[in-house]
Amino acid sequence: MVTRESIIEALQSIQEPTLKTSIASLGLVRDIVVRETSVSLSVVLHPDSMARSADVDRAIAEALSKTNAPAPHLRVRQMSEREIAETAAKLQPQAQAQAAQEKKAPIKGHGAGLENGTILHPDSGVEFIAIASGKGGVGKSTVTVNLAVALARLGKRVGLIDSDIYGFSVPDMMGIEERPEQAGDKIIPVERFGVKVISMGFFVEDNNPIVWRGPMLGKMLRNFFAEVSWGELDFLLLDLPPGTGDVALDVHQMIPQSKEIIVTTPHATAAFVAARAGAMAIRTEHEILGVVENMSYFESKETGNREYVFGRGGGGRLAETLNTELLAQFPLGAPDNHPAEPDFSPSVYKADSAIGQEYLNLARSVIERCGK
């Protein structure tokens, strides 16, 4: 006799295409109704999986045919934002357990671009940290730049790839005016504040827009790894584009050993959207180091009073959802830098400033979590 339980059991072998986990174990099989002559059910899929819904439909029909159930009436719908966050929370313990198991095993190079002798090879000793966000405008690049500089101030050898190929901003934020040099068949990255930097912005004239499709973006990203002479590094930070598009996916596939920091503002919606980036890290089995909440408050220079212009608590809720820690909370503001200064940059905080000290604390936390 066909029952609700036998249907769920039969669907255990079917994986959600994007999350690579059983739809049954994730609780994505819903609204099961069993009658004498019919079976109906709903299946919830990740937004990136909707293009493969027909494949899921066929797999379910085949699995249920082995239980002697009548042909199912199946409804497939896309996950809501809340369901994405809830599913991400379910996946996090699994990802952590697998990561722990992988740490016990010998590391082997795998994936495209992991040739022996390159910076991408797991034995290179480089700690890759991707800085991600669910949406633009949350200060992800500001966090990336200042974290990179803070790590360098603590004596670490640091590289930074401006992977936001459409919205590159790192050279301007760091006050870089020169271009990389060529040495044989290698590109020498520009060094600023002790950080080696490469960006699409170095290769674009007059701030022209980039109108490339996904494969071309991936090729440029590979060039940043393979054709740049990075030398010896302790950390290589990647400023990812917002969201979960082609470049972010390429980074996750190229560097299976990378870790991730998620940036959000305290606003509830920003944190809600940032859960997508966290879900992508979990889906691709990357360790999340923690969450950074930017623009947490505005502090008046005259009174010292704080105003929480974007609300409160978004970073903490996101960290809880992703089963990780809130690493830092930075205020809304800009560095007090003057264009006449020899090391002027629009976005890098001085080491002796209050926020500069907070970035040093963040860098120390990152070093500790990475075992460096």
Image (cartoon, grey):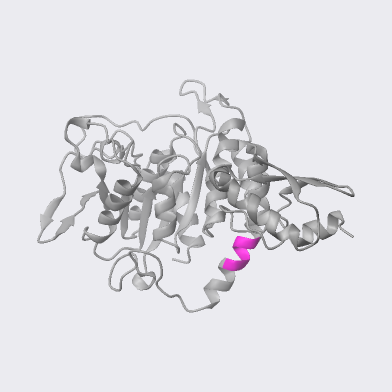
**Residue 179 percent across, percent down from the top left:** 15, 44
Q: Main secondary structure of the magenta part?
A: helix
Observer-nearest of 29 and 203: 29
- 162 versus 273 height, above or below: below
**The C terminus appears in which quarter of the rendering?**
bottom left
Q: Is residue 236 visible?
A: yes
Q: Is residue 351 visible?
A: no
Residue furthest toward the bottom?
106
**The N terminus appears in which quarter of the rendering?**
bottom right
- 127 versus 355 height, above or below: below
**Residue 320 percent across, percent down from the top left:** 66, 47
User: Where is residue 146, by image quadrant?
Assistant: top left
User: Where is residue 141, by image quadrant?
Assistant: top left
Q: Is residue 300 left or right of residue 150?
A: right
Does residue 252 show up magenta in the picture? no
Q: Is residue 203 left or right of residue 129?
A: left
Task: Identify which residue is drawn at 63% across, 37% down.
Answer: 81
Residue furthest toward the left?
184
Q: Is residue 8 left or right of residue 209?
A: right
Span of residues in magenta: 94-98
**Residue 272 percent across, percent down from the top left:** 60, 36
**Residue 93 percent across, percent down from the top left:** 66, 60
Task: Identify which residue is drawn at 15% across, 42% down.
Answer: 178
Task: Identify which residue is drawn at 44% across, 33% down.
Answer: 136
